[in-house]
Amino acid sequence: RVDCKPRAMPYCSQFLKDSLANQLSREGPAKPNSSTTLMMWFRQIFSWWNGQTIGTRFWTFRRGQLMGEDSQGNKYYSDRKNPKRRWVIYNGLAEASRVPPEWHGWLHQTVDETPSEAAYSPREWEKPHQPNLTGSQHAYRPAGSLVTGAPRARTAGDYEAWKPE
């Protein structure tokens, strides 16, 4: 957990260094230089879908207490003054379907303990995460879809268009 009180400033600077390293690791194996650092700051100022904005970074620095991290690298925080306020900072694109079930329960206040505190083990019916493929080339396209170009198979009670006589 990150403690950012005045007596713990070395830990806060390490927190900021880790955040910067995390942002740069998403941009590939390129070594950090002024242009990649500048690009990271532009992304944080002007986009909300690339992890966190500059406002979220500041709020997390001031009020956030790190509660844990999931297998995808998403970090979960709660407010130091109001522990019922909880949020996630995504490792990569901000896609809500990337929150695993164990953290979803904690994030939505269904359970009070984090999965790391409760020794969470998934049920046999829980499936591993699959990304939301809507809008991508791998999205599901049924037969008869406009994208596939194949005609739709007729069914027994198929629709017949009205024709004026």
Image (cartoon, rainbow, N blue to C red):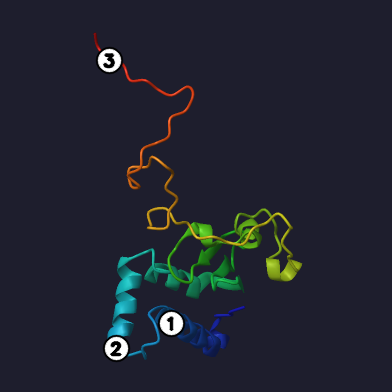
* Mark closer to the observer (1, 2): 1
Q: Is label 1 in contact with label 2 (beta carbons under 8 Å)?
A: no
Res. 15 mark: none
Kind of residue indicated by mark 1: Ser
Res. 163 mark: 3
**Residue 23 in the image, given as x and y percentages of width and height:** 42, 79
Residue sticking out furthest to the left = 165
Res. 34 mark: 2
Kind of residue indicated by mark 3: Lys
Left or right of 80 on screen, residue 31 = left
* Mark closer to the observer (2, 3): 3
Give the class, few, some or many, for how many residues have Cα within 10 Å of label 1's Cα (few <14, many ≥20): some
Left or right of 116 on screen, residue 144 = left
- In this view, 155 is above or below 67: above
> Whole-Å distance between the Cαs marked 1 and 2?
15 Å
**Residue 60 in the image, given as x and y percentages of width and height:** 49, 71
- In this view, 69 is above or below 84: below
* Front one among 162 and 71: 162
**Residue 145 in the image, given as x and y percentages of width and height:** 37, 42
Disc 1 secondary structure class: helix
* Front one among 36 and 83: 36
Question: What residue is disc 1 on?
Answer: 25
Q: Is label 2 in contact with label 3 (beta carbons under 8 Å)?
A: no
